[in-house]
Image (spheres, rainbow, N blue to C red):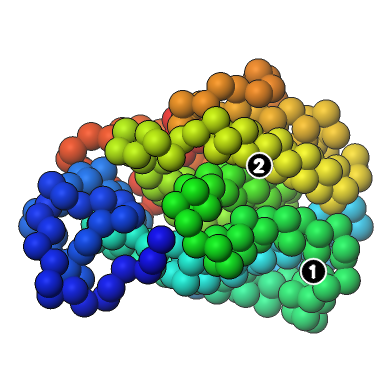
Amino acid sequence: MKRKDIYNPDSNENVNDRKIFGGNPTGIFELNNIKYQWAYNLWEMMLNNTWFPKEVDMTRDVNDYKNLTPAEKTAYDKALSQLIFMDSLQTNNIIDNINPYITAPEVNLIFVRQAFEEALHSQSYAVMVDSISQNSAEIYDLWRRDMMLKSKNDAIAAVYTELSKNPSEHNLVKAFFANQILEGIYFYSGFTYIYTLARSGKMLGSAQMIRFIQRDEVMHLVLFQNIINTMKKERPDLFTEKLKQEVIAMFKQAVELEVAWGKYITQGQILGLTDDIVEQYIQYLADDRLSAVGFEKIYNVTNPIKWVNDFAKFNDQKTNFFEGTVTNYSKGSLSFGDDF
């Protein structure tokens, strides 16, 4: 598998011949004719969801942070440090590791936009850190000092590193699933710790920032679910029993990592997040993501903290991302949760 040419005037590829990867694009973004309508719909939705971190008022969080219990402060710092790593990784991964092999221009658009949003999230975390910490380096350097965090980061990055070192169709499809896990399990888990504090009336500015970030991450999750489902139709030969077993192993490892991490940072001292709840919620997320791409559930558990879905919503608008039209999308208008 080779990276696409950025300019390929010898190509005669028409719109019906486009492929998500493995195509022969000219390099010209001809967007009046598109093959993947879901991609263009998603692009427009992402544009309409544009926001900026400085719009969020973090004033109250300064005092709230000082009054957190030691356990709450530890959970907040470590959850934030983990989120910082994941958005940093994604900004580079999307542009340098995934998009060079994507050959449908309407899908290229989304990846460029996603990379922008991941970078915007990094700025968001900087605003959060600057608001609550007298020494921002303490949070940014936590991954160097906390070996639990470091080992988890290494595991998350492993699949992307594998694609970088050995680019193949098999490894690219695995990377699509790894992105689904990152966007739909690891991020969701990290957001939950912030929402839990906000539910008790603490760190409300942080929770509002996370709402905006999560709304973006929902779009990213939907992107990879659409790509995987599209590839299952276009390239069923890639979805071998070997791939299926590797994907299941990836999900199981993700659940083990995130459950261990959740128990580690909460230490059973965060109201509303017992060890059993943490474990069941992560298992629920994994099952939900697997079901979305046609895989069987592994754990068959219910969502033990349904309040998170309602707490994260801007409003109750429901959206069908697979329809061919887009209407009424604006800043603060998109709901998310079980529907995706």
Label at residue 143:
1
Task: Residue under label 2, please give it.
Answer: 250
Q: Taking the image as drawn, is residue 127 in sight?
A: yes
Label 2 residue SS:
helix
- Left or right of 153 in this view: 260: right
Disc 2 residue type (three-letter): Met
The C terminus is located in which quarter? top left
Residue 165 place in picture, x, y as percent = 58, 67
Q: Nearer the viewer, residue 322 or 237?
A: 237
Q: Taking the image as drawn, is residue 59 in sight?
A: no
Look at the numbered discs 2 and 1 and tell me whether their residues touch, using CB distance below 8 Å: no
Q: CA distance from mark 2 to mark 1?
A: 22 Å
Label at residue 291:
none
Residue 267 place in picture, x, y as percent = 91, 45
Tell me the residue at 34%/39% (across/down). Answer: 235
Q: Nearer the viewer, mark 2 or mark 1?
A: 2
Residue 309 place in picture, x, y as percent = 56, 35
Q: Nearer the viewer, residue 151 or 328?
A: 151
Above or below — where is 258 with respect to 284? below
The N terminus is located in which quarter? bottom left
Disc 1 residue type (three-letter): Trp
Tell me the residue at 78%/39% (across/down). Answer: 256
- Left or right of 37 in this view: 308: right
